[in-house]
C-alpha cells in the first residue's frame, strides 16, 4: 500500500501547518502527515516551514527570536491565498501549533517532521518532547542537514529517519557507503532535479536494494500519483489529499 502523506496538512484547502489543516487531511483519508519544525526563543518547538512569519502571518520576525506565546499570537490564516487572490482565513483564529499540541491533538497519527535547522538545541528539544509523548515510533525524523540527522541517531533515536540531501546523493552514487552507515531510514526525494530524474525503476530498485522505503514529494497531479503507484513507490507527499488520495487508491495503492 502506498502511504499518502499530507504535506503541511491539506495545504490546498486550509492554511498550512495548522491543526485544522492536519485534521482536514485526515478527514480526506491521508495516511500520515508531514510538517516542519523550528525552535523558538524560549526553547519550545513550533510547526512552520519558513524561518520567519512573513509569508504565513505577515510578521517578519524570525521564529528563533520570538517566544512561543508571541508566535501563536500571529495570524496563521493570513498566508492562505485562494484562486481569486483573497485571504478567506485571515482573522479566523488560525495559529502555528507547538510540537506538544500536535502530538497531543493527533494521537497515534504517523507524522513526518522536517527539522529545519542544524542547531543541536533543536535536536535535543525535539527528542525530549517526542519522548515525553511516547511518540518516537510514529514520528519520522527528516532534515536536509546530515549533521542534524547524525546527531539525532547518535542520541539513540528509535523511530525512522529520512536521508538528508547529502546522504541521498551518496546512496544514489555510492551505495556501498550507505550500506556501511545506514540506520532505519527512508529516502524522501523529488521526482526530478533539473535534468536528473529520480522517479525511475532504476533509482527505485537501487534504493530498495539498500533496504529503504522511498517517498516522493510534492505530488499534486493525480496522473503523476497514479504513475508513481504503478512504479511501486512506498509513499507520496501531497498538498492536495482531496485529489491524490482517490487517485492513489483507484490505482491500487
Image (cartoon, rainbow, N blue to C red):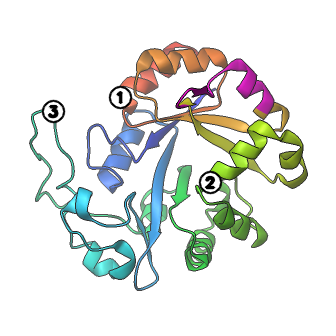
Quadrant location of the N terminus in the rendered image: top right
* Point 25% across, 57% down: residue: 56
Q: Residue furthest front?
A: 195
Closer to the camera in the image, 127 or 107: 127
Q: Is residue 204 magenta?
A: yes
Q: Residues within 10 Å of mark 3 (few under 14, many from 20)?
A: few
Quadrant for residue 183, please give it.
Answer: bottom right
Q: Is residue 182 left or right of residue 243?
A: right
Q: What whole-number distance in Å separates the C-alpha atoms at marks 2 and 1?
A: 23 Å
Q: Is residue 163 left or right of residue 250?
A: right
Q: Secondary structure at mark 2?
A: helix
Where is residue 132? Give x, y as percent.
59, 75
Quadrant location of the C terminus in the rendered image: top right
Q: Which residue is mark 1?
A: 242
Q: Which residue is mark 3?
A: 83
Quadrant for residue 155, please give it.
Answer: bottom right
Q: Is residue 168 left or right of residue 58?
A: right
Q: Which residue is mark 2?
A: 138
Magenta stretch in the rendered image = 193-206
* Mark with earlier residue (3, 2): 3
Above or below residue 59? Residue 120 is below
Mark closer to the observer (3, 2): 3
Q: Is residue 54 magenta?
A: no
Q: Residues within 10 Å of mark 2 (few under 14, many from 20)?
A: some
Above or below residue 152? Residue 114 is above
Q: What whole-number distance in Å separates the C-alpha atoms at marks 3 and 1?
A: 16 Å
* Mark with earlier residue (3, 1): 3
Q: Secondary structure at mark 3?
A: loop
* Point 9% across, 42% down: residue: 86
Q: Secondary structure at mark 1?
A: helix
Amino acid at each position: 500500500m502506498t502511504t499518502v502523506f499530507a504535506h503541511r496538512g491539506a495545504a490546498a484547502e486550509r492554511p498550512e501547518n495548522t491543526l485544522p489543516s492536519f485534521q482536514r487531511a485526515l478527514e480526506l483519508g491521508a495516511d500520515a502527515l508531514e510538517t516542519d519544525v523550528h525552535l523558538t526563543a524560549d526553547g519550545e518547538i513550533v510547526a512552520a516551514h519558513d524561518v520567519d512569519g512573513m509569508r504565513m502571518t505577515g510578521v517578519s520576525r524570525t521564529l528563533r527570536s520570538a517566544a512561543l506565546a508571541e508566535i501563536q499570537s500571529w495570524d496563521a490564516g493570513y498566508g492562505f491565498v485562494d484562486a481569486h487572490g483573497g485571504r478567506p482565513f485571515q482573522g479566523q483564529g488560525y495559529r502555528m501549533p507547538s510540537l506538544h499540541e500536535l502530538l497531543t491533538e493527533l494521537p497515534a497519527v504517523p507524522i513526518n517532521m522536517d527539522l529545519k535547522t542544524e542547531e543541536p538545541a533543536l535536536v535535543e528539544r525535539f527528542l525530549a518532547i517526542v519522548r515525553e509523548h511516547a511518540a518516537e515510533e510514529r514520528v519520522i525524523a527528516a532534515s536536509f542537514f546530515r549533521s542534524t540527522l547524525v546527531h539525532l541517531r547518535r542520541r539513540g533515536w528509535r523511530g525512522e529517519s529520512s536521508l538528508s540531501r547529502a546522504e541521498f546523493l551518496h546512496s544514489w552514487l555510492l551505495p556501498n557507503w550507505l550500506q556501511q552507515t545506514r540506520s532505519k531510514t527512508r529516502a524522501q526525494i523529488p521526482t526530478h532535479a533539473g535534468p536528473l530524474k529520480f522517479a525511475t525503476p532504476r533509482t527505485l530498485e537501487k534504493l530498495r536494494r539498500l533496504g529503504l522505503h522511498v517517498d516522493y514529494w510534492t505530488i499534486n497531479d493525480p496522473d503523476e500519483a497514479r504513475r508513481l503507484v504503478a512504479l511501486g513507490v512506498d509513499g507520496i507527499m501531497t498538498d492536495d489529499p482531496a485529489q491524490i488520495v482517490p487517485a492513489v487508491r483507484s490505482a491500487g495503492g
